Structure formats: C-alpha cells, structure tokens
Amino acid sequence: MATTDVTYAVTGASGRLGGRVARRLADAGIPQTLLARTPERAPSLPGATVVPGAFGDRDAVVRGLRGVDRVLMVSAAESLDRLEQHRAFVDAAAEAGVGHLVYISFYGAAPEATFTLARDHWRTEQHIRSSGLEFTFLRDNLYADFVPALVGEDGVIRGPGGTGRAAVVAQDDIAEAATAVLTHADEHAGAGYDLTGPQSLTFAEIAAVVTEATGRAVRYEPETLDEAYRSRARYGAPDWQLDAWVSTYTAVAAGELDGVTDDIPRLTGRPATSLAELLRRDAAAY
C-alpha cells in the first residue's frame, strides 16, 4: 500500500511526543487525523483534521478512527484509571476497523516490573495482542528531555537509584522512530522495539553530564526508600503517584532500565542522540 493511499491518526498531538510525530507527518505532506481529548489544544498543522476523542469515550473514538489505517497511540496521562482508558481506546480502535496500532509503551514492560507504571504498559500490550489489531510496540526508556527536571533547586538529584543505569532516550529520536514505523507499518507488524539512547548512565554520571553541558553544578545523592517517600510527601500526591515516582529510581537500581539497543539507529538511519548532545543542542531550554 503506497503511503499516499494510507490514512493516519495520531493521539496526544497536544503533548510533547505526539506533537513531534504529528509535525513530522505534516512536514512530509501526509494528511492525518488528530484525535484529541481537548480539541482546542491540538496543534494547527497542514493536512491535519482535529476530532474529539478522549480515550475513555468509546463512541467518539470509534467515530474518529473509522476508516483510519494506521494509528499512533501515545499512552494516556498518568492517572489511577489509565489502564482502563487504554483498554477502552483499544476496543474502540478495533471496533472502528483500524488496520495497525503503534503503541508507545515502556522499556522493560512486564507484569512484575519494579516501575509500577511499566506493569500497566505490559497489561495494555496484552490487551492489544488479544484485540485482533495489527500492532507494533515502541518501548521507550526514560526520556532524556526530562532529566533536567530531576534536579532540585539546590542542584541535587535525589532518589533511591543506587548505582543502577538507565539508557535515557531523546524524544526527537522516539518521534523519528515512530514516524518511520507508522509510514512503513507493514515492515513492523507484530514487532516490539526497545528505544534507548547510545549510553547507559548512572545518576552520578547523569549529574556530571548535566553539569558539563549546562554549567550548573549538579550532583547525585542516593536516598533510602523511606527518605524517598518522605522527601516527596510534601507534594501531596496520591499514593499511586508516589509509588510511580519512587519506583522510577528503584527500577534503575534494579537494573531494569540498563542496556543499549540499536533500534533507534535501525529505524531512523542515524545514531541515537546522547544526553550530552541533547543538552548542548537545546541549552536554552535547560
């Protein structure tokens, strides 16, 4: 099927990752449907049609995806009922007759993953497998773009990450990989890709990279589990959210985000972006 004969839809286009993919499709002159929970927040892009479609609104999703061949499903915003939202969306996509679903999952997604939200990603993957939809899973490591947000006002990264490593990955790299998979979906049917950066770094090494790239003195201080929960309790977040925040670090400590793959280079045709390169390139943003 020629690319010009294929219909596309993207979710999450008002966000960082979905927006990157939507802009790449628009830049390539590919018409697309942007399925949006809040349509007025969706970007205005050439060839893009914005339609309402919150993940949990089955009727709206079915209407929005009817006749669409390939869909990028960016995981919903973190919430207590995110898994239920995902299942509802997948069921609606199947009812709408979607040809191929590309799902943004998480590195190390598994039923007993240390990172609590990775368990929901695994359950979503299983639901997609059982839906009858053709699929591809993109399992992203931690976003390199978010690393500066880990640094406190005092220049310290704190967490129970020990000396574990994470192969942090740039969102632009993920977006390029997702666009390549969407536009050549037949070549990736049933596949799962682990999307990583070119290095697997400890938090101490991450702090050193941030220091060198930004000129701001940053260091890493390991926390115990009790210290991690106490230091985050002041935000007043619900228990499930605290568990997610803390288990991001404990998953790293457990080695579950370690390991560099060549999936980004294979899908995009260029090397993956290092954390240092990303921070230098976007120095003004950080």
Image (spheres, rainbow, N blue to C red):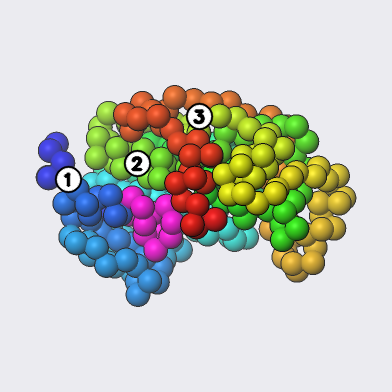
**Which label's residue is closer to the chain start, 3 or 1?**
1
Start and end of the magenta stretch? 10-21
Q: Position of residue 115 (x, y in %)?
A: 67, 43
At a point 27% along the width and 67% down the height, the residue shown is 44
Does residue 91 appear in this view? no
Q: Position of residue 255 (x, y in %)?
A: 69, 29
Q: Is residue 114 above or below residue 150?
A: above
Q: Position of residue 23 (x, y in %)?
A: 29, 54
Give yes or no for residue 141 being in the magenta stretch: no
Residue at the spot of label 3? 198
What is the C-alpha distance between the residues marked 3 and 1?
33 Å
Answer yes or no: do the residues labelled 3 and 1 have beta carbons within 8 Å? Answer: no
**Which label's residue is closer to the chain start, 2 or 3?**
2
**Amino acid on which disc 2 is placed:** Glu
Label 2 vs label 3, nearer the camera: 3
Residue at the spot of label 2? 176
Does residue 241 appear in this view? yes
Q: Position of residue 157 (x, y in %)?
A: 72, 49
Which quarter of the rendered picture does the C terminus lie within? Answer: bottom right
**Which label's residue is closer to the chain start, 1 or 2?**
1
**Amino acid on which disc 3 is placed:** Pro
